[in-house]
């Protein structure tokens, strides 16, 4: 409000007026409106609108000031602001970080926003607290919860604003920019919309020329449909297809397809099940159709192709025990877990992992780091230290 008004003690005067109206002996409902507060605090040299601004600040900062239907009054029970702060203090930092993600742990501001969201969500989910609130407090809680949810969503979108796409020439990073004002935050929809605008995501059909140039070898006249579809999922330099219909529409637009003894070409509707079919170059499809009409050709048999889930059902040769001795760079441990341990675990294997850690530092390693961080972590994850040696 400005230092020039400090001598008038606006907050103290308003709080005193609200207090008198809160605990008076009047039989009518206790409390005072902003209009009456302006009259109660009428002073020479104080602008009339400043009272409304001061009351709003008091409503945000005082713990025992309540408001209901434009009436302000004090009670011995804490208000919504106090309850929110108590809930925020009860939320452990670990829980906040777990919900907010690894990237947000590097800055305090996002963590505070997540803490506020978690606190408001906990209050909203407590039937006892909700029963104790006035209608005004309940509306305020819903508004604060919507605002907190929106703020966290915006922070998430601003943190994850870059899209990385692989090309033949290498990796390219795209900056989606900051969200526009009024945009409803939704990260997945935003990424999808951006990729469509940049023509990196195809949702209607893929060009037949793109299929021939990027999936077919120069001397290939035909290719199993399953290989064409799986290539679009496997290789990052290929266009991103919204779904399988995008590929089917591309085949219909200019390529041929053989399924059993039948050739589909020239925009014909394709069958729904194509995993046993073969994609043909257009000239090959035309040639085979002409030969079929003349009765001069027997179509080559197509080797049946299994769906990915059918391939998974095949029973390859199995082994009982796998023992590996490795020397892995420490910064590749996550890759080791993802590419080695997780697949073994999915196979139902009981995994025993012995680690030989040797760490040397020219400047020395802090004893606190060893005792308070390293050993505590090992204890929490249930690791057994077989041998320990320090120098």
Image: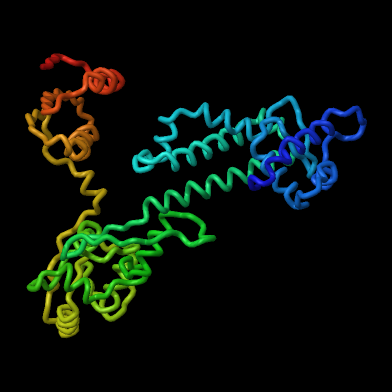
Residue name at image x 9 percent, y 73 percent: 218
Q: Is residue 172 above or below residue 1?
A: below
Query: What coloring was used for the rendering?
Result: rainbow
Q: Where is residue 320 in the image (x, y as percent from the top left)?
A: 12, 28
- Of 138 and 85, which appears nearest the observer? 85
Image location (x, y in percent) of residue 154: 47, 52
> Viewed as shown, does residue 235 lie left or right of 137?
left
Residue 61 on image: x %, y % = 64, 36
Q: Is residue 120 left or right of residue 68?
A: left
Q: Considering depth in this image, is 84 or 190 the residue closer to the camera? A: 84
Image quarter for residue 250? bottom left
194 vs 45, left or right, is: left
Residue 306 is drawn in which quadrant? bottom left
Quadrant where the C terminus lies? Answer: top left
Relative to the observer, which residue lies in front, 142 or 249? 142
Q: Residue furthest right?
A: 27
- Please state if 188 lies on the left or on the right of 80 as rendered: left
Above or below residue 209? Residue 155 is above
Total numbered labels: 0
Tell me if residue 10 can be seen: no
Which residue lies at the image location 17% right of the left edge and 67% below the top edge? 215
Q: Is residue 308 above or below residue 77?
A: below
Residue 161 found in image quarter: bottom left
Is residue 379 shown to the viewer in this render? yes
**Percent position of residue 109, x then y:** 45, 42
Q: Nearer the viewer, residue 147 or 30?
A: 30
Q: Which residue is drawn at 7% across and 29% down?
A: 325
Look at 65% across and 31% down and name the residue there.
127
């Amino acid at each position: 409000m400005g230092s020039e008004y400090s001598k008038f003690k606006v907050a103290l005067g308003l709080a005193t007026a609200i207090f008198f109206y809160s605990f008076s002996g009047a039989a009518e409902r206790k409390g005072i409106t902003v209009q009456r507060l302006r009259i109660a605090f009428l002073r020479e040299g104080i602008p009339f609108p400043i009272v409304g601004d001061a009351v709003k600040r008091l409503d945000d900062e005082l713990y025992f000031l309540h408001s209901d239907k434009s009436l302000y009054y004090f009670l011995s029970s804490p208000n919504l602001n106090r309850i929110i702060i108590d809930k925020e203090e009860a939320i452990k930092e670990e829980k906040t970080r777990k919900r907010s993600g690894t990237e947000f742990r590097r800055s305090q501001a996002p963590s505070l926003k997540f803490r506020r969201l978690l606190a408001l969500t906990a209050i909203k989910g407590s039937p006892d607290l909700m029963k104790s609130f006035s209608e005004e407090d309940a509306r305020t809680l819903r508004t604060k919860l919507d605002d907190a949810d929106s703020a966290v969503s915006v922070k998430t979108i601003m943190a994850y604003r870059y899209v990385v796409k692989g090309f033949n020439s290498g990796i390219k990073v795209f900056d989606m920019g900051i969200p526009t004002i009024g945009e409803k935050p939704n990260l997945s929809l935003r990424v999808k919309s951006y990729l469509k605008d940049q023509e990196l995501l195809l949702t209607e059909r893929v060009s037949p020329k793109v299929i021939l140039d990027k999936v077919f070898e120069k001397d290939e006249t035909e290719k199993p449909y399953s290989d064409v579809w799986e290539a679009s999922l496997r290789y990052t330099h290929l266009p991103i297809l919204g779904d399988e219909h995008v590929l089917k529409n591309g085949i219909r637009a200019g390529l041929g397809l053989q399924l059993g003894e039948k050739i589909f070409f020239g925009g014909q509707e394709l069958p729904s099940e194509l995993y046993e079919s073969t994609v043909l170059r257009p000239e090959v499809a035309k040639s085979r159709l002409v030969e079929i009409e003349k009765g001069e050709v027997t179509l080559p048999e197509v080797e049946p192709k299994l769906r990915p889930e059918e391939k998974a059902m095949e029973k390859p040769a199995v082994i009982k025990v796998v023992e590996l001795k490795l020397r892995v760079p420490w910064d590749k441990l996550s890759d080791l877990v993802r590419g080695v341990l997780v697949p073994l675990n999915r196979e139902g294997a009981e995994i025993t992992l012995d680690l030989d850690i040797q760490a040397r530092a020219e400047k020395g390693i802090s004893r606190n780091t060893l005792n308070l961080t390293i050993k505590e972590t090992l204890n929490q994850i249930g690791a057994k230290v077989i041998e320990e040696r320090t120098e």
